[in-house]
Image (cartoon, grey):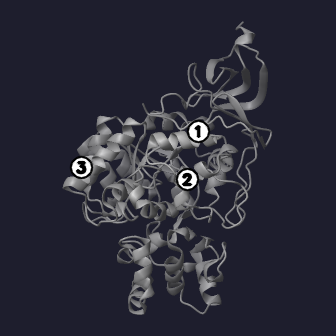
Amino acid sequence: MSDTESYNLVLSGLIYDGTGAKPFEGYVGVTGDTISYVGKEKITGTKEIVAPAISAGFIDIHTHSDLSMALDGRCESKLFQGVTTDVSGNCAFGPVPINRERIAEHTAHLQGMDFTGGGYQESDISWNDLNEYRATLETRGIAQNNAPLVGHGNLRIAAMGLKEGGAKGADLARMAELLERELAQGAFGMSTGLTYVPSRYADIDELVALGKVLKKHNRVYASHARDYDILGDDDFFGVVNEALEVGRRSGVRVQYSHAAINQPHRWGMAGKWTDIFAAAVKDGVDACFDVYPYDASSSALTQYLPAWVQADGVDAMATRLADPETSARAERDLAKGWGALEIPWQWDRVMLSATEGLLDTKAGQRIDAAARERNLTPEHLVLELCRLGGNRVMVVLFYRTEEDMRTFIRSPHSMICSDGSAIAFKQSKALPHPRSYGAAVRALGFIGRQKHDLPLEEIIYKMSGKVAAHMGIHDRGVLAVGKAADIVAFDPATVRDQATFTEPGQPPIGIDYVIVNGQVAVAGGVQSEVRAGKVLSAL
């Protein structure tokens, strides 16, 4: 029998250890902030928790919690799902680096990932590098962990502003220098967002050069892909090839962000997509991808404007659209469809989720209905909202299918993410996508228990051990002696999400306890005052 005094906390139940192995009835012992026992032998401790199931804390591999976590350290929407670590800094929108001389550009850029409608301000960004960001968050106190990536958009703004074209010469050297600095301070890698200004201006030579920097430090290259193929002539399946080609040419480990099929005439073809990805992995590319368990996406409305309208950032865009002749041209081009592939607009599939009340619009309205109320064309309404609100106007697009999403999740190369943020349940200005409140538990309840797409241990693996191994988060992700004590106690029979698109801010059901670094953060649906989270380091 183990020494009872050595355990501050003991959890017992059906153990899902985060490796994908079959669960077993057993015990997990915690000493301080570390797991000190995992096994079948009965142990006791100062505090004991009995639950139907015990799991490694979930790691959300794709989030945008960079500023939301800094502004609200409670991290409610993620913590109540059992998500103990958010990988932040995705889609090129990272917390670092920050160039104080270009703080306005940085702020406008990061507003593109503010799902709350609050509007990030320059004063919200008080740090310049990762060490300062880490100190800021840990001083303020955060309830979950943060594993930050460097945003490629931040790199470009800090080094060269909003200049178009692939980075060359001194600009590229400065980007590499800044990337080296942040990696030396513990960043887990770099992300691109190749449909967003200014990340979209990069060419593949720039990405490969930065990939080689990442490879040298054994860090990850995460990429939100372009919406067109720059390497061949297959604009549908070719977009995945650029990320994989960066991996081939640089040797860097690749994470392809939030796999999806948005073109209605391509729905049902996820199996072909995953076959292409699997072939690249078989050929030696070290790559995985992530997907969130919903058939709708969300982003800043500006992302869907013609590329020439977005050029040079939101201030230039607003000036451009203030000219009636230029605005009329933009309206004609926007009417052709969205993205480089000009996907036909179905305006009843586009819901406003954060509008700041501009033009008396409200979150929850569909674009077609909002336009009719104002006797405007949908295109004119969209352009005006973007002109007045910039990246702060957010939308949800219902342009995906459940069938494709489930096919992506079943792939052995996928992980499960949210693409959301750690935010409060109560939101007064917006209707954030429900993924921020329910992605992890939806995977357990809907994908696992209801649809039987994968056994529960594999779903948990795709949200814990697999993520930790691929991202290089070496001290957590599995229940094993010596690992950080990030643990979830839940009920497999009842766990499910409650968040909806019109009522997103609802806590899930079936998550009983959440332990972060050995301390109880959530118990019986109540969050404690504990702020045991850390900004993790890849070093």
Q: Is residue 354 above or below residue 45?
A: below
Expressed as whole percent of the image width and height from the top left, the position of residue 160 reads: 30, 59
Residue at 48% in and 42% down = 132
**Residue with the mark numbered 2:** 67
Q: Residue furthest front?
A: 101
Expressed as whole percent of the image width and height from the top left, the position of residue 27 reads: 70, 20
Q: Going by the image, does 235 lie left or right of 17?
A: left
**The disc labelled 3 sits on which kind of residue?**
Ala
* Residue 283 is at least partly visible in this image: no
Considering depth in this image, is 3 or 114 the residue closer to the camera?
Answer: 114
Alpha-carbon span between mark 1 and mark 2: 13 Å
Work out which quarter of the rendered image holds the C terminus and state it: top left
Q: Is residue 466 above or below residue 364?
A: above
| Labels 1 and 2: the sequence-earlier one | 2
| Labels 3 and 1: the sequence-earlier one | 1
> CB atoms at circles 3 and 1 under 8 Å apart?
no
Residue at 63% in and 44% down = 448
Work out which quarter of the rendered image holds the N terminus and state it: top right
Expressed as whole percent of the image width and height from the top left, the position of residue 36 reads: 62, 17
| Labels 3 and 2: the sequence-earlier one | 2
Asked which quadrant contains residue 428, the reply is bottom right
Q: Disc 2 on helix, strand or loop?
A: helix
Density class for disc 2 (Cα within 10 Å; few <14, some 14-19, many ≥20) is many
Q: Going by the image, does 229 lie left or right of 21?
A: left
Considering depth in this image, is 171 or 307 the residue closer to the camera?
Answer: 171
Asked which quadrant contains residue 373, the reply is bottom right
Alpha-carbon span between mark 3 and mark 1: 32 Å
Q: Which mark is residue 138?
A: 1
**Residue with the mark numbered 3:** 173
Q: Going by the image, does 141 lie left or right of 217?
A: right
Considering depth in this image, is 486 or 297 the residue closer to the camera?
Answer: 486
Q: Disc 3 on helix, strand or loop?
A: helix
